[in-house]
Image: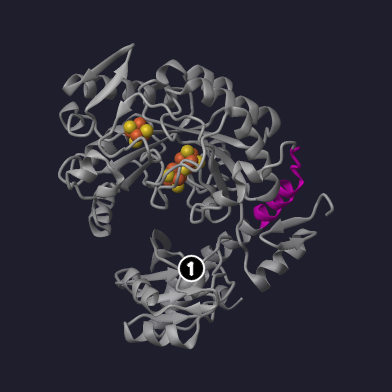
Amino acid sequence: MSANVISLDGLQVASRDDLTKAIETQGCESSACGTSDGPADMDPATWEKVKDHPCYSEEAHHYFARMHVAVAPACNIQCNYCNRKYDCANESRPGVVSERLTPEAAARKVIAVANEIPQLSVLGIAGPGDGGYDWKKTKATFEKVAEQLPDIKLCLSSNGLALPDHIDELMDMNVDHVTLTINMIDPEVGEKIYPWIFHDHKRHTGIEASRILHERQMQSLDMLSERGILVKVNSVMIPGINDKHLMEVNKVVKQKGAFLHNIMPLISAPEHGTVFGLNGQRGPNAAELKELQDACAGGANLMRHCRQCRADAVGLLGEDRGQEFTMDLVPEEVSYDPSKREAYRDWVAEERGERRAAAQEAKAETSAVVATDAEALLVAVATKGGGRINQHFGHATEFQIFEVDAEGVRFVTHRRCDNYCVGGYGEEDKLDLVIKTLEGIPVILCAKIGDCPREALEEAGIEAVQDYAFEYIETSVSAVYRARMGLPAAEAEIA
Ligand code: CLF
Ligand code: SF4
């Protein structure tokens, strides 16, 4: 294969034109991004840092992938939603980490993934314990990767307790992105979440533990913000314990300079063996989560596209290709070839600009004819990335949900499901679950759908539309909105 050939899941192309054509005809398995212009309300330096980061930019998550390496198993606190046997709940859904890696093995794995997945832009360390506490391994991994793959962004997730001791080293390593998990700013709330912490060679319990944790978390946030490192705050929403309180957390972290606030639902089940799982503490439902997120309007900007991924996840946020890159599959000797990633970034820079322009045009034309108080419409989209409707209904393991009104098209959330079609055949019980997943969403856009599932959806009051296969999401959602209102299609939507 020549140096400039890009391979996306079996799709091999030799140039940008070929790539565009391939995506238009087959759908893009992924994507990355990089227009030079950021959103109007963001300074160019910040945009430069976030434009390729799938967690820090909703737009980027259609194009770019992250990978986590599980190099940091030790942790210095106990969260009632965590069982050490499982991934860190700060940054992952519960599930045993497949393998823990040494920094050397991790660097080898990153090269292997970067050679195969051109969308890869970020290496994150998210446990399975705490990367700030298990610092030697975190630092050694970041240094090895930075030395061999200087164009990969480094991203750390931590509970913040040990972090003030390492912030200057993070600066030295050019780490631009740090996630702090902050579940409270009131130690009385913290006491219900953290039974103990280990700090200054000593174990602390009760309210003292939460007081120290809170102070260190605030110190970490202040120090990172002062140094221009972008901080995303993750908060686990625990009904009856910190749900109302998180509005205060949102205000405070905004004042202290957090770039984003990611409010994630508690994942809790008895089989996880956590304190909350065993004592029946439930997580919030989707409506409760949305209500809290909406109540935080005006505070810190919210991240709504988090997938609560594993501490060893690989791929676009909605997918996990970790099983393709277990260490037994990674060669002993592997050298980095940046050419595919470079070609991919170039392609995305242009593609992203075109998508944004089309979305702006559709928005302008829609807002010119739709009343400002017209009811918004929710639309589900089956997509494999690239900002396009490029997935068959039966293959979707999640649907991205967009809202459209006179103000334009916005990503709202995603809903997960099992794919309906397995081995070429649809499974009826799975279709029932997919329909349940789509409850409250009147339209779904996909690249293709069979007659059977389409009729079943129709009976459930959901219109399945495949007329916009491989088109941009925003222009298609906008066109459907106008069509359902009996309005003509806008020029940008026909183009
Ligand atoms: Fe990983 Fe976290 Fe960095 Fe992203 S994840 S360390 S910021 S590269 Fe992203 Fe995964 Fe949500 Fe985390 S979707 S769990 S927010
Ligand atoms: Fe578990 Fe992460 Fe909490 Fe540590 S910080 S106890 S690894 S969830």
**Any part of residue 268 in sight:** no
Residue 359: x and y in percent read 53, 64
Residue 473: x and y in percent read 51, 67
In the rendered image, residue 340 lying in the magenta stretch gets the answer: yes
Mark 1, secondary structure of its residue: loop
Q: Nearer the viewer, residue 41 or 453?
A: 453
Relative placement, left or right, of 108 versus 475 is right
Relative placement, left or right, of 289 versus 181 is left
What amino acid does circle 1 point to? Ala
| 79 w.r.t. 456: above or below | above
Residue drawn at x 61%, y 56% as measured from the top left: 31
Residue 347: x and y in percent read 70, 55
Residue 388: x and y in percent read 56, 66
Look at mark 1 in the image and give the residue it sits on: 396
Q: Residue furthest right?
A: 2
Start and end of the magenta stretch? 334-350
Q: In the figure, residue 112 lies in which quadrant?
A: top right
Residue drawn at x 55%, y 23% as measured from the top left: 139
